[in-house]
Amino acid sequence: MPDDEHQYNDSNRAFLQVFMAKGALTLKEAKPILARIFSAHGRCPLDHFKSHRKKTDFSLLVEGTETVETDVTEADLLSYVAAANDAISFFDLEIRSMLSQTDHTRIWALVNTTSDPMTQLATTHSADEISYLKRLLDAMFETYNTPRQEVMAVTAMQAVRLHKNPSESQANSTQNGGTTQGSAGKGLTMADAERTLELFVEEGWFEKSHNGFFTLSPRALMELKHYLINTYNGPNDEEDGEDEERVEKIKNCHACRELITVGQRCPVRECTVRVHDMCTQNLFRALRERKCPTCKTEWVGENYVGERVVTTTEAWLKGRRRSKSGAKTNGTQQRMRRQVDEAEDEEQEQETRSAGF
């Protein structure tokens, strides 16, 4: 980028406008966007500018200069992110980044640094939809997040079953005399719940896996980090003394220290060590042994966090085999029906021709 790289201009505004519309970007997604911005505003990528600035005295800001996405680097993206953050910091907004829990792709997302995420959602969603989102989070991080099974995900069927608000007796449970937040309405219909779930995916709050499980997206983890910790991490319910143990349903990866909802866990159930799949190699290389860094138990890599808690069980695999077998049988039956129909049509045509029609 040229000497005026620190001046906020129309190219920076264009980048921020696109970013706010999308909510989150990877480098791969940002490259064509920046390439078009560079081309439209006559700018050049950092590497291109640095390689030419000693060879010429005139500006490289040539109107109509075409930039291809392969010329755009991560340094260009970081430069525009930094400029955007300077501009939006007055509005309590910030573009933050984290690594994907599955493939370590870095993801940048626009987050609010002060406002309650639920308050933010109130501008675009109804009270019943926000209440539904809270029930989904409760299911992910309470119901399906136990010491025995840390799934932290829900299937479509489990999600749709949460369409109604809790019963009146549950809704009126109080804390210091106040009612539970977001439990005033009747809830959603099942059709509305399905639509709202799809909308949360489109908006980037949830991700849907190929096995049909819904989990929080990287953007949501960044946005909801403090909310999740404050809501689901607390003192042990069995003790009220000062020596009580803190319940940690929301944990960090032992290697990268980011939130973990997909990865591996220590074989010892009481141990709190959790590691992202992509972090295990570097962790155990540094430790020079494949053992839990806390309790020293042999790390077998077959104890999971996330949907694999369910999808690696024999019951799940057997159900999948039955489903595939059923689908195959249905497909065979459909083909047989088509063949019968075709044979009947051909027979009718022959009869018609024989009758002289």
Image: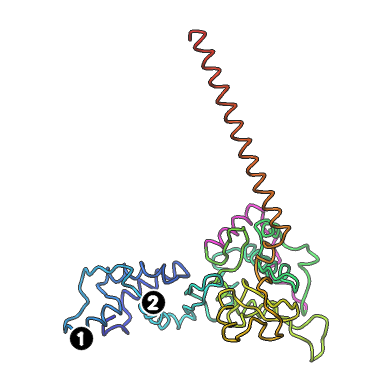
Along the polypeptide, which appears first: circle 2 or circle 1? 1
**In the rendered view, would you say 291 is above or below 134?**
below
Residue neighbourhood size for the residue with mark 2, other residues' Cα within 10 Å, grouped as few (<14), some (14–19), many (≥20)? some
Residue 99, given in percent of the width and then of the height, sits at: 52, 75
Mark number for residue 54?
A: 1
Q: Residue at x 52, y 13 (%)?
A: 352
| Highlighted range, magenta | 177-202
Q: Is residue 182 left or right of residue 356?
A: right
Q: Quadrant of residue 303?
A: bottom right
Q: Quadrant of residue 154?
A: bottom right
Amino acid type indicated by mark 2:
Glu
Residue neighbourhood size for the residue with mark 1, other residues' Cα within 10 Å, grouped as few (<14), some (14–19), many (≥20)? few
From the viewer's side, name the closer residue of 259 and 39: 259
From the viewer's side, name the closer residue of 230 and 331: 331
Amino acid type indicated by mark 1:
Lys
From the viewer's side, name the closer residue of 235 and 51: 51
**In the rendered view, would you say 316 is above or below 278?**
above
Residue 83, given in percent of the width and then of the height, sits at: 38, 81
Q: Is residue 237 left or right of residue 12?
A: right
Residue, far bottom: 242
The residue where tag 2 is placed is 74
3D distance between C-alphas at marks 2 and 1 = 22 Å
Let me know if residue 180 is in the magenta part: yes
Label 1 SS: loop
